[in-house]
Amino acid sequence: MMQFADTKHMESGKFMREKKNLPGLLKEHFIAALFVLFMSVIYIRMMFTNGPWYDELYTYYYFVSRGPVYAAIHWPVPNNHVGYSVLSAFFDFFGNPYIGLRGVSLIAAVTNLILIYKLCLKCLDKYYSLTVTALYAGAYLVFRLSVQGRGYTLATTCFLVAVLSCMEICTGNYGKRHFVLFAAALCYGLYIVPSSIYWVMPVCIAGGLFLLFEKEYKKLLQLFLSGVCAAVATTFLYTLIWLAIGANLLCKEEGSAFFGMGQVSVILKAPVKAALKGIEYMTATPYIQSIDRAECVKGLFDYFKVLCSQFYDRIGGLALVLLSLGAVVCIIQLFTEKSAGKEKRFVLFFVSCCSVLVPAMLIIQSVHPYKRVLSFYLIPLLVGFVICISGFVNAIKNKKTAFITGALIMCLSILYAVCSVLGGYYNQPLAEVENAMESAFAKMDTKEIDTIYYTDDFQKYVLKFYHDVTPTEVYTLAEANYVVIGPEQRDENYSAPEWPVLYPFSQGLLDDVARDMEEVARGGGYTVYRRK
C-alpha cells in the first residue's frame, strides 16, 4: 500500500541503506528501471538525430574542440559554460562531435532521473517517487535541455548531488565522503554556470536551518566549512579565468606597460592587475542586466507563469497554481508535523527553502533570468506537489481505494511523459538555419574549402561540427576561393545585418559572385560558390 508515512517509506528506501545485489534492486524497482531505460533510449535518439543549434555549435567551435585546458581558461561571453565545456572537451577525444558536444548532457540527463527517484524515496514510496520522476522527465523545458551541449542539465545533476549529500549529513547517515560530495557539487555547479547560485543558496540554507532547529551545532559548523571550501575552490577556478582574460587584454592594450608581452609573462609580473582586469571584463558583460525592482516584483507572477508554461505547455497558469499549492502544503507541514522523521523534515525544509528563496533572490537581484536558468526549480516544486497529492490520497479511509488511486496517478504520469517525449512538439528541430546550411555543405567535398568569405557566423560552426573543417577566414571576396550566399544576401529588403548574419543584401556582391565564381552546392536556401 502506498503511504506517505515515515514508518512506511523506510521499506521502499532500503536500497539506499542496505547492500543488495543489482538483480534484487532491479526486481524491487523494476518499473522505475524500465522507465529510465526508455528515457535513455529517447535521449540517445535525440542526441544523434536532432541537430545542434547556434549556442551548441558556438560552444563546440570555440571551446570543446580546442581541448580541456583552453576551455578552462577562456570566457569571452556568458555563453561559455566553463565546467561543461571542460568535461565535454575530454569526451571529444572519442572522435565523434555528437559525443563530444552532448555526451556529458546525455549522462547527466539519465543520472538526474535516478537521483530524483532516489531523493523521493526518502519521503515517498516507490510509486509516488516514480510519479515525480515521470512528471519531471515529461516537462518540455527539461526534455529540450536534456541532451543539448549546454551546462544546465549537468548543473541540475550537481544540484541533486548537493541535496542528497546534505540530506545524508543532516539525517545522520553520513561520512566524510558526503561533505566532499557536497562541497564538490556546489563548486562544480557554480563553475558550470554562475546562475547555479539560485540553487546553491537555498540548498545551503535548507541544510543550515535544519541543523539549527535540530541543535546539531557541530554538524552545522562542518556543513558551513564545507560550503566555505566550495567557495574557495570556485574562486580559484574562476581566478584562472580572470588571469587568462586579464593578461590577454593587457598584452593587447596599446599604451599599456605590458603591450606585446606574452600572457604568461603578464601573469607572472602582475597577477593582481591581470585578475582585476579579468573581473572587470566579466562583470561588464552586457548579458548581465538588472531591471527596475518595482517592475521585477510586478512581473514576477507572469514570469513564473511563463516558466511553468515552458514546463507544461498551454497549462502554465494551472501548473503554477498546483505547484505553488504543493509548496504551501510543505511549508505548513514543516511547522505542524512535529513527529515527522528526520528525512521527511529535511525534504520539507528543502522544498520550502527552494520555493521561497528562488523568487526572493530574483527580487533582491532585480532580474528575470532566462527561463532555462531555472529548469532545476521544477524538482522541489514537483516533490512538494506530489507530497500534497499523496497526503490527500492516503487520507482515504478505504486503503484499497487509496492504493488504486495512487497507482492510477503514477500510470497517468508515466503515460503523460511517454506521449510527450514521443510527440512532434517535443521533437521539433532545435536548429533550422543550421540544418538548412548543412544540407548545402553535405552535397560537396568540404575538405577542399581553403579560404572562405563568411557572410554569417553559422557557416564556420557548421563546417567545424559536421565536417571538422576550419578554413582560413578572409575579409574580402577577392581573397576568398569560397563563399556561401544565403537568403539574406538575396533579399532586397534586408538592408542591415542582424547577428549572426554579417552582411545584408548587396547587388554588387551578387554581381561579383556571378562573374568570378561558380556554384558547387545548393540546399535549404543556401548556395556554395567556388572561384572559377
Image (spheres, helix red, strand yellow):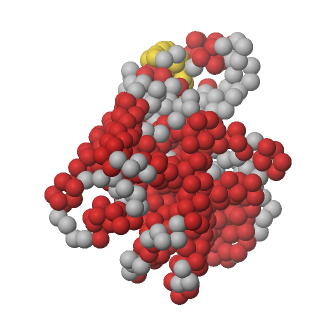
- Which residue does the image show at 64% across and 18% down from the upper left? 489
Name the foreground residue: 294 vs 263: 294
In the displayed structure image, the side of residue 370 where residue 7 appears, left or right = left
Q: Position of residue 256 (x, y in %)?
A: 78, 65
Tell me where residue 273 appears, x and y as whole percent. Answer: 73, 72
Q: Residue at x 37, y 59 (%)?
A: 121
- Image position of 190 with respect to 513: above or below: below
Q: Against 428, is 493 above or below? A: above
Camera-nearest residue between 76 and 52: 52
Q: Most extreme residue toward the front, as rendered?
A: 397
At a point 41% along the width and 32% down the height, the residue shown is 420
Asked if residue 307 lies left or right of residue 153, the reply is right
Residue 164 in the image, given as x and y percentages of width and height: 43, 66
Residue projecting furthest to the bottom:
218
**Position in image of residue 428 (x %, y %):** 46, 27
Residue 145 visible: no
Q: Nearer the viewer, residue 289 or 8?
A: 8
User: Residue at 58% across / 36% down in the picture?
Assistant: 318
In the foreground, 58 or 189 = 189
Residue 424 seen in the current view: yes
Please tell me whether residue 23 is drawn above or below residue 422 in the rendered image.
below
Total labels drawn = 0
